[in-house]
């Protein structure tokens, strides 16, 4: 195969993973990154002895091919596994933390659903298949197949935990393609899961991993595994121009210096809200650019509390908890960060990471630090018996947190395909196209 000169825009997890694959295929890769560091959303910060993750807090490793890629990148030697107690996850029901069942006996004993809600869940294999509607929302699918209570007390908190959104907003086929496929192929989620089909190979046991320096170390390790790729930081791409024979990329450095270079292929892994600022020149099918940039985001704030262990009544024996909207609390949920991984808090202290805002309360994500700190303190005092004020408080605000897999994702994916077909050597990747989970960013090609 002829070696190509490939420009990748953005050194987040998507851009770095793509660079690793292209380099291994023998191509010459140039990554351009606007920030002073690699990693994009994956940012970790050490403050007063607490280790905070601003973006993803962990990577859920399920599939063999994702593991193999990370292993070959040399990342797995540094990975640390979450404490096994964090298999336990809580939701709030009637103002109390209720552990989610981990097996069939605990499903019958758990109070996360009422007896009627559980019975409705068990009827799932007998519910007839829906129409092939690629536009169905997650809310419609879950209430149709599993019942309204499962929507309110399982899907609603789960979606706010992953996407800071609501099941009514998300498109099922875009956000949970495997659930959509299970119904289409087997007529039922449960029966489909029991069938042994042409499934992607799983690792023996799902692993939840992070790194001693936090999640930013994942992208630092991938960057250092790149042997022939050049990474330019503090350099923003401002224009991408199709020429007669290849691509011309214009950049500007943070000191204002402009430069131009040529390449055979260009892969954008830009967040959509940044892609709008690029001057895309001489493109065929350019009428698709407006659809390419269709995206829904909500603001989200992460409130970090560092607290003396004895000031919390709850044993913090799990991953954390999620709050269903029906419970009428202010927060979306809290991670027991120092239970998840060691060395996240000084001795005798705990670190809690609480999510505020999203689609449910965008106003609250934008409130002042004092307001957010107070509503978080109030809810944590009701739910886990937090006494007094935290001795450590820090806030991270994401104005445009997560590109949602709603109906707009269909528009941007179709537009990306049309632009790639019309312009040889132009590709679009990154979480807005592949899906936001870290494995999706690693596995994309
Ligand atoms: C608060 C939060 C919590 C999350 N938690 C989890 C979790 O627990 N588990 C999980 O699996 N996922 C989680 N995610 C999602 C996951 O972190 C992201 O989907 C993923 O990191 C996105 O990576 P990316 O490379 O596609 O994009 P980005 O990380 O956004 O990278 C894009 C890069 O492009 C650069 N750039 C922008 N403009 C230019 C320009 N003009 N020129 C050059 N470069 C430019 C940016 O600086 C950036 O580095 C979370 C996301 C958020 C926001």
Image (cartoon, rainbow, N blue to C red):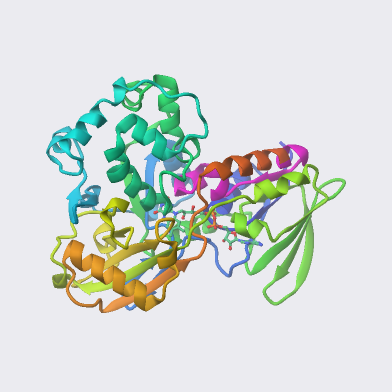
**Looking at the figure, which quarter contains the C terminus?**
top right
Report x, y in % for residue 28: 69, 50
Residue shown at 39% from the left, 72% from the top: 395
Report x, y in % for residue 157: 32, 49
Q: Nearer the viewer, residue 149 or 202?
A: 149
Q: Is residue 408 above or below residue 235?
A: above
Report x, y in % for residue 167: 41, 44
Residue shown at 50% from the left, 28% from the top: 133
Residue shown at 35% from the left, 27% from the top: 189
**Looking at the figure, which quarter contains the N terminus?**
top right
Q: Would residue 120 appear left or right of 233 to someone viewing this image? A: left
Q: Would residue 114 appear left or right of 213 to someone viewing this image? A: left
> For residue 319: magenta?
no
Q: Nearer the viewer, residue 211 or 440?
A: 440
**Residue at far right of view:** 244
Q: Would residue 317 appear left or right of 250 to someone viewing this image? A: left
Q: Nearer the viewer, residue 94 or 339?
A: 94
Report x, y in % for residue 361: 40, 61
Question: Which residues are the magenta region?
Answer: 419-445
Q: Would residue 110 appear left or right of 165 to someone viewing this image? A: left
Residue shown at 51% from the left, 42% from the top: 443
């Amino acid at each position: 195969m002829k070696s190509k000169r490939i420009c990748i825009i953005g050194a987040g997890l998507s851009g770095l993973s793509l660079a690793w694959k292209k380099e291994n295929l023998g191509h010459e890769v140039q990554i351009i990154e606007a920030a002073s560091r690699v990693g994009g959303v994956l940012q970790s910060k050490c403050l007063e002895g607490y280790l905070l993750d601003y973006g993803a807090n962990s990577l859920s490793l399920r599939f063999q091919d994702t593991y193999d890629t990370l292993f070959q990148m040399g990342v797995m030697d540094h990975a640390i596994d979450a404490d096994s107690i964090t298999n336990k996850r809580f939701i709030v029901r009637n103002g109390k933390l209720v552990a989610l069942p981990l097996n069939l006996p605990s499903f019958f004993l758990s109070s996360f659903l009422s007896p009627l809600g559980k019975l409705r869940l068990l009827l799932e294999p007998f519910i007839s298949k829906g129409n092939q509607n690629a536009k169905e929302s997650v809310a419609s699918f879950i209430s149709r197949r599993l019942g309204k209570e499962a929507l309110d007390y399982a899907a609603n908190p789960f979606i706010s935990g992953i996407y800071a959104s609501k099941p009514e907003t998300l498109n099922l086929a875009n956000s949970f393609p495997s659930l959509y496929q299970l119904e289409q192929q087997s007529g039922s989620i449960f029966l489909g899961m029991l069938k042994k089909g042409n499934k992607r190979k799983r690792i023996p046991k799902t692993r939840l991993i992070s790194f001693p320096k936090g999640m930013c170390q994942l992208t630092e390790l991938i960057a250092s595994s790149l042997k022939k790729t050049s990474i330019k930081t503090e350099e923003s791409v401002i224009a991408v121009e199709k020429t007669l024979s290849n691509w011309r990329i214009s950049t500007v450095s943070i000191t204002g210096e402009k430069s131009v270079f040529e390449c055979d292929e260009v892969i954008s892994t830009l967040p959509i809200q940044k892609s709008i600022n690029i001057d895309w020149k001489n493109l065929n099918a350019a009428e698709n650019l407006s659809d390419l940039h269709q995206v829904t985001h909500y603001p989200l704030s992460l409130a970090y509390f560092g607290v003396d262990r004895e000031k919390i009544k709850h044993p913090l024996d799990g991953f954390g908890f999620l709050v269903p909207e029906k419970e009428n609390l202010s927060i979306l949920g809290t991670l027991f960060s120092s239970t998840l991984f060691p060395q996240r808090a000084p001795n005798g202290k705990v670190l809690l990471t609480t999510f505020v805002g999203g689609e449910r309360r965008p106003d609250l994500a934008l409130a002042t630090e004092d307001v957010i700190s107070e509503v978080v303190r109030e809810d944590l005092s009701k739910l886990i018996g937090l006494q007094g004020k935290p001795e450590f408080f820090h806030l991270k605000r994401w104005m445009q947190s997560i590109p949602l897999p709603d109906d707009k994702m269909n528009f941007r994916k179709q537009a990306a395909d049309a632009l790639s077909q019309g312009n040889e050597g132009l590709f679009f990747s990154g979480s807005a196209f592949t899906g936001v989970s870290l494995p999706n960013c690693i596995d994309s090609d």
